[in-house]
Amino acid sequence: MADDLQMARAVQDAALAIEGVASLGTGRWAEAATYGAGEKVTGVVISHDEVRVHIVANYPPPEPLQALAERVRERVASRVGGRPAMVVVEDIEVVRDENL
Amino acid sequence: MRIFNRIVVVLLLAGIVALGVTMLFYLFDVSDYHLEDLSRTLGLNGLYDGANNFVQRAESRSLDVLDIVVLALVALLGLVLLILEFKPPSPRRVRMHQGTYVTRRAVEDEVNSAVEGSHEVLQSNVKVKAQRRTGARVNVTASVRPGENAQSVQADVQDRVQQRLDRVGIPIGNLSVQVRESDPRQTKTRVK
C-alpha cells in the first residue's frame, strides 16, 4: 500500500512536469485516486494490472493531444515497474494569460 | 442490459437458495416436515397438471395461436438477451493511441466550442460516442434561424469541427452534422 502511494506520487510528479499538462483530473463518476492510510494521491490510479493517469491539458496545447498523451504515457511507463500505463485526457483548460 | 440480466440471475439464485433451504428441512424431516408433502405445501400440483396438459397439447399439435405466439416471443426475447450479453460493452472513452484516451466530455466541449463559433448557429446539441477503434463518432445538431441556408451552415460547421479537432489533436472517426431550423425565442442564443 505504501509502495503504491510512493509510486502514485512519482507518477503525479512526472506527469505534472510535462509541458502542456495543466493539472491532474479527479475522475467524473468515481474519484480517480490512489488511497493510503490517511492520504490519497488524486489523478493517479494504481492497480495490479495497470497504472492510469488522468490529466487536464492546457488549451491551446503545445502539441496535439495524441502526442502529449503519448509523451505522458512514456514518461509514466518508466516509473511504474513494467505495469502498462494508460493516460486519460479528462479535460482541456484554457491557459490564463498573466499579462491580462 | 447487463444490469437487467444481473437482476434476473440474482432473483434466480435467491430462488435456488430458498428452495435448497426448504429441501433441507423436508429432507431431514425437521419439525414434522415430509418431502412427499412439499409439492402440496407449495401448491405445485396445479402447476404440474397445467404443465402436463400443455406438453400433451403441444405433442398432439393442438396449441392455440396465442400460445404459439407467446412461445415464439419468449424464444425471441431469450435470443435477443443472449446476443446482447455476448456483445462487448461500448468503450467509455475515446481512444487516441494504444494506452491513450480522451474523455467524451472533453471531446463534446471542444465540438461545442467549434460549432457555437459559427455566427449562424444559435444552439447546438453534440453527442459523442467512443468507438472500439481509434477516434470518436460525433453527431452534431445545430439550430439556426428559419430561412438560413442549411447546406452552407452544415458545411461551415463541419469544417469548423474538423479544423478544431485537428488542431487540438483529437482523432475523429465519423462526423455527422444536422441543421435544424428553430425559433430563436426557444434557443440558448437569440442574437449573435
Image (spheres, coloured by chain):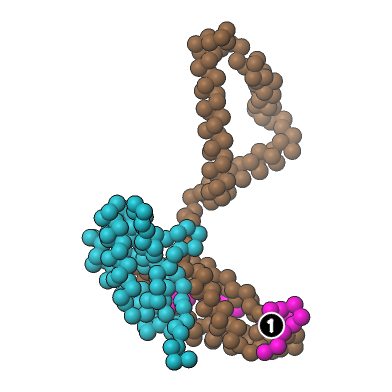
> Which chain identifier belongs to the cyan chain?
A
Task: Return the residue found at the far bottom.
Answer: A99
Which of the two residues, A87 or B127, is positioned nearer the viewer here? A87
Q: Kindly identify which chain the residue marked by label 1 belongs to.
A: B
Above or below, B60 against A56 in this view is above
Which residues fall within the magenta stretch? B170-192
Q: Which residue is mark 1?
A: B189
Residue B184, x across and y down, in percent? 74, 82
Instruction: Find out whether residue B172 is within the magenta segment.
Output: yes
Mark 1, secondary structure of its residue? loop
Q: Of the residues shown, which amino acid type is indicated by label 1?
A: Thr
Q: Which residue is painted at 55% across and 25% down in the image?
A: B18
Q: Which residue is painted at 36% across and 57% down in the image?
A: A39
User: Quarter of the image holding residue A88?
Assistant: bottom left
Q: Which residue is painted at 67% across and 19% down in the image?
A: B43
The answer to whether residue B30 of the structure is visible from this angle is yes
